[in-house]
Image (cartoon, helix red, strand yellow):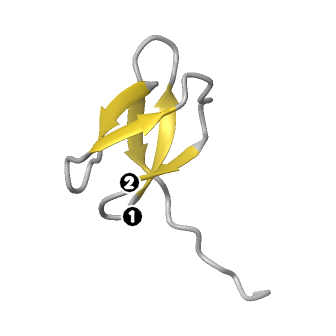
Amino acid sequence: MKNSNCLVCQSAIEVENEVFVGEIVECSDCGEEHEVVEANGSLTLELAPEIEESWGE
């Protein structure tokens, strides 16, 4: 398991060793979604971008 901290509430986030760049992981305490930006060696997370709906416009 790889470990990092939530960027919102600072709780520990554990992910599998086979995590890949671009994968979305969720904080189990606050529910904030994080995107994996580096997975080789150390685990680096950023807040996941919000997905906006275009409603066909």
Q: For the residue labelled by badge 2, is the local secondary structure a helix, a strand or a loop?
A: loop
Task: Check the image and report above or below for 32 versus 6.
Answer: below
* Mark 1 to mark 2 CA distance (whole Å): 5 Å
Task: Check the image and report above or below for 31 versus 6.
Answer: below
Local packing at callout 1 (Cα closer than 10 Å; few below 14, some 14-19, many 20+) is: few
Q: Which mark is residue 27?
A: 2
Residue that mark 1 sits on: 31
Q: Quadrant of residue 44?
A: top left
Q: Residue at x 47, y 54 (%)?
A: 48
The foreground one among 37 and 30 is 30
Task: Check the image and report above or below for 53 versus 35.
Answer: below
Disc 1 residue type (three-letter): Gly
In the displayed orientation, state which residue is furthest to the top.
41
The foreground one among 31 and 21 is 31
Q: Is residue 42 left or right of residue 49?
A: left
Q: Is residue 32 left or right of residue 51?
A: left
Q: Residue at x 41, y 36 (%)?
A: 14
Local packing at callout 2 (Cα closer than 10 Å; few below 14, some 14-19, many 20+) is: some
In the displayed orientation, state which residue is furthest to the right.
56
Q: Quadrant of the C terminus?
A: bottom right
Disc 2 residue type (three-letter): Cys
Q: Quadrant of residue 2?
A: top left
Q: For the residue labelled by badge 1, is the local secondary structure a helix, a strand or a loop?
A: loop
| Residue 6 image point, x, y percent | 29, 47
Q: Quadrant of residue 16?
A: top right
